[in-house]
Amino acid sequence: MKDKIRESKILEVRGTRRKALKDLLARESPVTIFLNDVDLVTLLCTPCDLENLAVGFLFSEGLLKGPQDIKKVFADKRDGAVWIETYAGKRPSRKAISKRLITTGCGKRLSFADMGKGLRKLDRDGRPKLSPDYVAEVMKRFQRASNAYLLTGGVHSAALADERGTLYFGEDIGRHNAADKVIGQCLIDRGDLEKLVLITSGRISSDILAKAARGRIPVIMSRAAPTDLAVRLARALNITLIGFARGHGMNIYSGEWRVTIQGPGRERKHS
Amino acid sequence: MKDKIRESKILEVRGTRRKALKDLLARESPVTIFLNDVDLVTLLCTPCDLENLAVGFLFSEGLLKGPQDIKKVFADKRDGAVWIETYAGKRPSRKAISKRLITTGCGKRLSFADMGKGLRKLDRDGRPKLSPDYVAEVMKRFQRASNAYLLTGGVHSAALADERGTLYFGEDIGRHNAADKVIGQCLIDRGDLEKLVLITSGRISSDILAKAARGRIPVIMSRAAPTDLAVRLARALNITLIGFARGHGMNIYSGEWRVTIQGPGRERKHS
């Protein structure tokens, strides 16, 4: 837990009462990812599960195709660094990643088509199929799982679940990093992303949706809101996007065919 | 409002009831910033107040010193582009910005000292001085100000306030962009950031703190949590950092001397 949380003196003000006390803060540290000895990127993150973070990040950025590419991963928490060696050993261009993250780099504006580039449409058939009860149950457990959030109010979390329940769980001050951590962990375990559900504590924007799409993860869900661009991408790629999953309610924005109808709801028309 | 919100068909599930309806989503669009005809960066943002966004972003990144540098700003909403010309007319290196945003680019890991680089310590004296009542009142108004949030649940907001109340207000799907929008607007108006309070709806991480520091904004506050790194930076730079500002309570993490003591609290010891 000490990777995630740090004690700090604060002054608590409640009405006219002031009290000096110690409180717990979410830790944030710069961590540099070295790919084949090139220092590619420095992420501001919660300094835990750094191997997972690095593998997930490189995969999301298209710099790793999968676990079969990885020769070695080594993280030095104290130094805030992760080294990854691939079998191919190719030294990446730092330019490639900055383009990918923040600019098209081609003298043009980014279009909707650009955003979906390299992302293939998913099959409409196949697993998983989810019931509303499953969504409610998985989300309830997810909400309670983050001790770091309960203690600090300052971290996001992400999880990967199959039809039976949660397989991987990650925490980070950044919602992108938290998603990369669970995706990275699944890849290191040589798990099959293509049958899983990605759960995030944060809003679903296009870049989070793109992480699911890159991993061919067919379902993404959150208790928070999606953006219109994430919804458009999800529809174009046949990804099921569920937002505002709270209690026994949810909004399905895309790919509702993966959510099975149960109980009396089946018979009812749109009421 | 149509820049911020888009209508979309959704399937609402409540228990066993399913209902197809139209809901409102927060808009997200790629917007490219051209500085002296170089396409510097593409941001995913809420496509409103693009001039403010571009000016605030370039200022936060150290690519604009202030409003006196700006010859012309022109935004094309439909094309998702903002052009900024400076009097110096220097074409920026795209490399500079990618380094700044995501990597040290010097073969080393980023240190705490690196993060504060170029950021000068603020004076402990001077304005603003805030009372707990002021904080409560400004935060109450801030919470109610974002129509886009009330309608979609999917946007962040930021504001700049002086001792009398809010001067600038901005909304964006990204908390960084929302802060850049209000900072940019203040710069375009040739306002004085050095006496203002930056309010954000999001968590205060080191990169948001650095935006305040770059503008020499002495106070930053949020109803959400800060990270430990943001608190360390705030202390090193004499910035007042207030988190969990809710109702008549708040936690002061740094620079408590800018918050005046009122009422019976003055006489009380830490109880």
Image: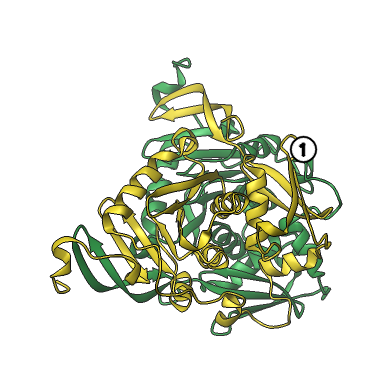
Chain colours: A green, B yellow
At 75% from the left edge and 63% from the top edge, which residue is drawn? A98
B123 to the left or right of B85:
left
Please say if B49 is above or below B134.
above
Residue A182 visible in the shown view: yes
B86 to the left or right of A240:
right
Please say if A94 is above or below A75.
above
The image shows residue B58 at horizontal and vertical percentages of 68, 58
Q: Quadrant of the C terminus of chain A?
A: top left
Q: Name the secondary structure under disc 1.
A: loop
At 73% from the left edge and 81% from the top edge, which residue is drawn? B106
Tell me if mark 1 has few (under 14), some (14-19) or many (20+) residues whose alpha carbon lies within 10 angstroms of its own: few
Pick the front one: A20 or A136: A20
Mark 1 is on which residue type? Asp
Pick the front one: B5 or B253: B253
The image shows residue B99 at horizontal and vertical percentages of 72, 70
The image shows residue A241 at horizontal and vertical percentages of 57, 39
Which image quadrant for residue B126? Answer: bottom left
Which image quadrant for residue A1? Answer: bottom left
Please say if A84 is above or below B3.
below
The image shows residue A250 at horizontal and vertical percentages of 45, 35
Q: Chain of mark 1?
A: B
Residue A76 visible in the shown view: no
B208 to the left or right of B82:
left
Which image quadrant for residue B231? Answer: bottom left
Total of numbered circles in the picture?
Answer: 1
Pick the front one: B67 or A247: B67
Question: Where does label 1 land, which residue?
Answer: B79
